[in-house]
Image (cartoon, rainbow, N blue to C red):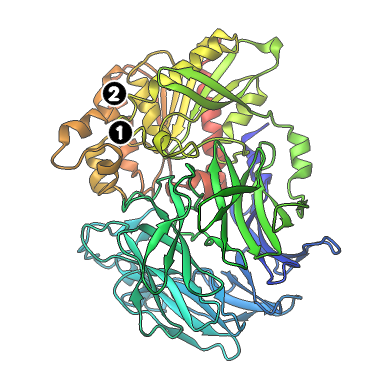
Amino acid sequence: MRPEDLLRFRSVADVACSADGATIAYTVSEIDAAADEYVSSIWIADAAGAQPPKRLTEVGKKKSGAPRISPDGTLVAFISDRESEKPQLYVMPASGGQAKRLTDLPLGVMPASWSPDSKRLLFAARIPNAPPPKDAEPRKRWEQRPRHVTRAQYKADGQGYIFDSRAHIFIADVSDGSLRQITHVDVDDRAECWSPDGRRIAWVRNRPGRGDYNQSDLYIASADGSSARQVTSDVGRPISPMWSPDGKWIAFYALDEPTPWIGDPMVRPWVVNVESGAARCITKGYDHGVVLLPPPAITPGPAWSPDGRTVTAIFAVRGDAHVIRANVSDGRVETIVGGERQVTYLASAPGKRLAYSAGDPRDPSELYVADWDGRNERRITQLNDELVRELDAPIPTRRVFDTPNGKIEGWVITPHAGHLPAPLIVEIHGGPAGFVGDLFSTSYFFKYVLASRGWAVLSLNPTGSGSYGRAHAHGIRGRWGEHDLPEQMAAIDALISDGIADPKRLAVAGYSYGGFMTSWTIGHTDRFKAAVVGAPVVDQISFFGTSDIGLWFPAWELNAEFPRDRAALAKFSPLSYVENVATPTLVVHGEADDRCPIGQGEQYFASLVACGKVPAEFVRYPGGSHLFIVNGRPSHRVDFNARIVDWVTRFTAD
């Protein structure tokens, strides 16, 4: 396998069902390697399989996505950048034909939702506080204007500066194309949805207070935006509201407590009474959280059953992601779609059909449909079948390791017996609340390339990982590195004892929290012959002031606040131990990373050079956000994986 093979995979993104469950709309995303760009198109499929899927939009050089089928089944709404730099809202016949553009907003629009009568579309869009000039030269000068910042939370990774714009909610009339903004408060409004009778809407509004970082509340209003009122309070970051069939309740996702941590894995489905405002968690007794799409995307809300007795969502369960149905009254749960795989997107026709994208250890993404109860599953797409057969990638095996902190699960790729013991690459995931499991990864593609060349691969879910419950996920707080490094080392020792890993040819690589852990690891042990530190946090104090989450993330994750706890912040900074590093180290970082800003990578590389003890190199990716290894420039993703393969191979050679 070669790093550039990752460019050949295609994936299913947004999925939508018609009201009767007979038709499925979905987005297929692929890579144009020659143009070094992503392209996507919208497809429509017969759920019963009587007709082959049909492409509604052309591939071209542009992206179309977020299809939504009207309740009467005649139209498909979608967003596309086919005519402008930013994605705009369109509608077209579900049978195919000419698309009609409904918006021309300067920063584009977010996915829309249909009114029950199929006449209106509700959506959110970011609106600049001062509209930019349309002419090229004045616009260039406007883009270089001084930026007057008055609040500390003023940027977001992948979005850039957000302090000079607000997300507001709009209604578009499909028949005449008229557009009306219905929220105007100086905060962000998003995640909007219609009541069943079309007379009211619900949405999420961010709090404006200085200390309420990432806090939000659920609001409802009349369909024209009037009579708005707050419904929830003291609920941890509600998102993705969905009205009950009788209009008396709203289901949504929220945290167990009002924490600002956007990556906490213990997000669960809740319900709130529209009139009284009484809110409660549905699955308090089920120790797993739902899977959310990374911001700024909005995860579809919990799917109500027609009788209002249950809600359905995707939950992370021990390295997998399953479709789980929860009883609203007593919290009992039932697995509807399970297996050794990860469901990544869920849509439904309540009581009739489920449609979902899912990946497994061999294929990252395909589209499936099933009955409402999960039976009669059928795969709609065969996007990657031929490529999967050609590459024949090695399949990781789930394994349980004994560690000083108890039993920890991980996934191991073991070479053929004739090649043992083998060099071992330890891949450390991000988060720390992320998790590895039964899903083929095109982001960490290097591990398959190395495995195809005879390497063993260890991907562990140490303490702090999601999908194993609250205690496991929160067990790393205030113990970064100190608690999970012994777990990693115990798993490595087990593979050495089994004759799988060669103790003289160990390498470690990680990204984000994995970058922190890699730099922490090589500052505390000299057992590794090569290390790749990706987008790390190495200095918690400078991270506080430069990251888009730095204001509250260390306080939550490390139980240490700036400026009061400077000593603790220094303690959990790998930069404090850089003089101990005896491992050749490659640092890789996106230049537009606002989550773990590139200054972190710069500091670590410069410090390694200053110490002068080991070979050190630094690779910067222009325009790369924190998630560039997931959705950045395709050539950069190939380069990222190729450099890891080359670096660890070079320094672990016999």
The secondary element bearing badge 1 is classed as loop
Q: Looking at the rendering, in which quadrant would you find the C terminus?
A: top right
Residue 313 lies in what quarter of the image? Answer: bottom right
Give the alpha-carbon distance from disc 2 to disc 1, as whole Å: 9 Å
Total tally of numbered discs in the picture = 2
- In percent of width and height, residue 301 lies at 52, 62
Q: Is the residue 92 above or below the residue 601 in the image?
A: below
Which residue ends up furthest to the right in the rendered image?
Answer: 50
Q: Nearer the viewer, residue 313 or 296?
A: 313
**Is residue 632 visible in this depiction of the protein?**
no
- In percent of width and height, residue 505 lies at 52, 13
**Is residue 155 visible in this depiction of the protein?**
yes
Disc on res. 538:
1
Asked if the residue at tag 1 contacts the one at tag 2, i.e. Cβ–Cβ closer than 8 Å, the answer is: yes
Residue 617 is left or right of residue 453, and the answer is: left
Q: Nearer the viewer, residue 79 or 233?
A: 233
Which residue ends up furthest to the left in the rendered image?
Answer: 564
The secondary element bearing badge 2 is classed as helix
Disc on res. 243:
none
Mark 2 or mark 1: whose residue is earlier in sequence: 1
Q: Is the residue 534 above or below the residue 342 in the image?
A: above
Tell me the residue that label 2 is attached to.
578
- In percent of width and height, residue 318 lies at 54, 36
Residue 46 is left or right of residue 491, and the answer is: right
Q: Residue at x 34, y 42 (%)?
A: 598
